């Protein structure tokens, strides 16, 4: 475990990965009957497949949030270092 607190986007990346995984399983479950000539699943299963792109979107938003907060922290560190160098 790390000592640093989670960034705001970390939770979004984790949730996006879980939602993507559920959507991927639903997509596989809807395609298998088509290839094996079985009865089709109900329409609800096809709607669950739409979780895959939604999960990808949520994860990408989390990645962008992490990048933005990381950039802000780096600028704050540089400003603090410049301030101590000028004062010293």
Image: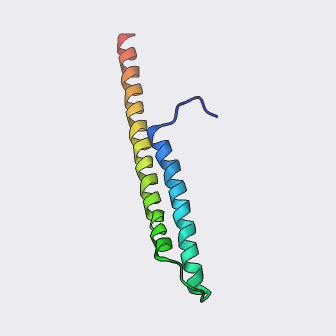
* Residue closer to the observer: 68 or 13: 13
Q: Quadrant of residue 70?
A: top left
Q: Position of residue 27 (x, y in %)?
A: 53, 72
The answer to whether residue 85 is left or right of residue 32 is left
When the figure is inspected, residue 60 is found, relative to residue 34, above or below; the finding is above
Q: Quadrant of residue 53?
A: bottom left
The answer to whether residue 32 is left or right of residue 43 is right
Q: Residue at x 42, y 26 (%)?
A: 77
Q: Position of residue 69 (x, y in %)?
A: 40, 37
The answer to whether residue 57 is left or right of residue 15 is left
Q: Residue at x 51, y 65 (%)?
A: 23
Q: Position of residue 47 (x, y in %)?
A: 45, 70
Residue that protrudes farthest toward the right in the picture: 1
Q: Quadrant of the N terminus?
A: top right
Q: Quadrant of the C terminus?
A: top left
* Residue closer to the observer: 41 or 67: 41
* Residue closer to the observer: 54 or 1: 54
Q: Residue at x 50, y 43 (%)?
A: 10
* Residue closer to the observer: 15 or 72: 15
């Amino acid at each position: 475990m790390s000592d640093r607190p989670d960034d705001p986007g970390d939770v979004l990346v984790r949730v996006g990965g879980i939602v993507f995984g559920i959507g991927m399983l639903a997509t596989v479950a809807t395609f298998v009957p088509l290839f094996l000539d079985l009865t089709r699943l109900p329409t609800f299963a096809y709607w669950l497949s739409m979780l895959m792109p939604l999960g990808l979107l949520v994860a990408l938003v989390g990645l962008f949030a992490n990048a933005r907060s990381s950039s802000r922290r780096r600028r704050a560190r540089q400003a603090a270092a410049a301030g101590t160098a000028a004062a010293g």
